[in-house]
Image (cartoon, helix red, strand yellow):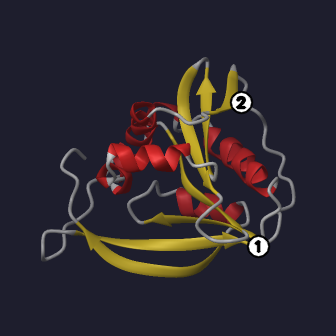
Amino acid sequence: MPIKRKPELDDNGQWPVRIMYLRMSEKPTPQAIPSPAIPHSIQRAEKPTVSFYRYLYDAVGRDWAWTDRKKVSDADLKEILDDKDTEIYVLYIRGVPAGYAELNFKHFPGSVDLAYFGIIPEFIGMKLGPYFLNWAINQAWLRDPDCITVNTCTLDHPKALPLYQRFGYVPYRQRDLTIDPVEDL
């Protein structure tokens, strides 16, 4: 299970957040990441329904205060999901969704953004994160980009930043901001 924590509020009743932007400018040396020893698969969800995407987003992000896509209307989210430059991949364990990765090929010419990545809480601690991240990075490099980007923040799982760095991502910018607290944490 994840390390569920409620961030401290600042003087204005908001959560201080530091966003770390990372990039990988060259294809990393392949890592020997063992496949999960349990039945699993990774499938592309081609033009997933908005409700299925929201399920994945909420299941992965609920403990980490993910709110960005909750603010997007169903119509706008459907447009994102149906775009040829958005690819959603779902990791299944024994037929059950265990995490997802969203690759975006549109926002920055010549780059791929790992827009969202995560493991559903019930599957955290099973060593699926490194396996699935390695798979997603390899998938992104199939397009031969100039770089692959990702960002993480202080609300994310504490192992997120070190994991990205272990796989070759390098911080290039950070931004501090505050957000309204999420009530259901």
Is label 2 in a helix, a strand or a loop? Answer: loop
Rendered location of residue 95, percent (x, y) = 59, 18
Q: What is the spatial separation of the Cα atoms under label 1 and label 2, in whole angstroms?
A: 28 Å
* Residue 3 seen in this snapshot: no
Q: Judge left or right: residue 32 versus residue 17.
A: right
Labels 1 and 2: the sequence-earlier one? 1
Rendered location of residue 50, percent (x, y) = 42, 36
Q: Which residue is mark 2?
A: 36
Say what amino acid the circle numbered 2 marks. Answer: Pro
Q: Looking at the image, is mark 1 or mark 2 nearer the viewer?
A: 1
Say what amino acid the circle numbered 1 marks. Answer: Ser
Q: Judge left or right: residue 57 versus residue 151.
A: left
Q: Residues within 10 Å of mark 2 (few under 14, many from 20)?
A: some
Q: Is residue 148 above or below residue 60?
A: below
Figure quadrant of residue 42: top right
Q: Which residue is mark 1?
A: 25
Q: Is residue 77 above or below residue 93?
A: below
Q: Is residue 167 above or below residue 17?
A: above
Residue at 40% across, 74% down? 18
Quadrant placement of the N terminus: top left
Q: In the rendering, which numbered label is found on residue 132?
A: none
Rendered location of residue 72, percent (x, y) = 34, 52
Residue at 83% across, 61% down? 144
